[in-house]
Image: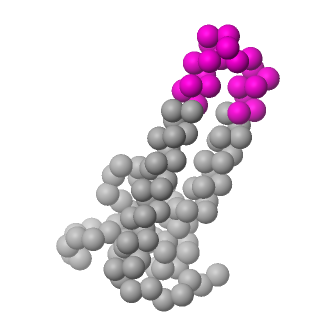
Amino acid sequence: MTEPFLPPEAVQREFQHRRRAIQSLAVIAALTATAIVSLLFLDVLNTRVAVPALLVGFSYAVWVNMRLWRCPACGAHLGKLYLGLNGPKHCPNCGVRLVNGDPDDT
Ligand SMILES: [Zn+2]
C-alpha cells in the first residue's frame, strides 16, 4: 500500500505523534504488567486470570507495534523500537527523514 505524499514537516510531525503514542502505551503496559504480576504474587489474582491478562496485553502491544511503528511517508515498518531514544532518524525503506534536526546528522 502506498501512502499519499506528505511534506517533510507532516511526516516528522506524524512520526513524533506515533512515537509518543507508543511510548505512552509502553509505560501503561509496563505498569499494568507489574501490577498483574504483583497481584499474582500477593495471591490477589490466580494464574487463570493473570496469565491470560498478560497474554492479551502482550498481543495488544505487538498489534500496536505492527500498526503504529510505520513510516508516515511509505507505510513500511520501522523495525526495532527506539523507545526514549531519538531514532530511527530515517525510514529504512524510503529514506525520508523522520525527525527534525540537522539534515546531515545521521
Ligand atoms: Zn518510508
Image coordinates of residue 54 in percent, x first then y, are 67, 33
Colouring style = one colour
x and y, in percent, of residue 28 in the image: 51, 40
Image position of 91 (left or right of 48): left
Point out the residue furthest to the bottom here.
5
Residue pictured at 56% horizontal, 83% vertical: 3
Above or below: residue 30 compared with residue 20 = above
Does the stretch in magenta take in 45?
A: yes
Query: In this picture, which residue range is highlighted in magenta?
Result: 33-53
83 to 78, vertically: above or below:
above
State left or right for residue 88 relative to residue 30. left
Residue plotted at (65% across, 17% down): 40
**Viewer-proximal residue, 46 or 96?**
46
Q: Main secondary structure of the magenta part?
A: helix
Query: Is residue 8 visible to us here?
Result: yes
Rendered-image quadrant of the N terminus? bottom right
Q: Is residue 6 above or below residue 52?
A: below
Quadrant containing the C terminus in the rendered view = bottom left
Residue 93 shown left or right of residue 98 in the figure: right
Measuring 41% from the left and 53% from the top, which residue is drawn there? 82
Position above or below: 42 against 101: above
Looking at the image, can residue 90 be seen? no
Q: Magenta stretch: residue 68 in it?
A: no
Name the residue furthest right.
48
Q: Position of residue 95 (x, y in %)?
A: 41, 77
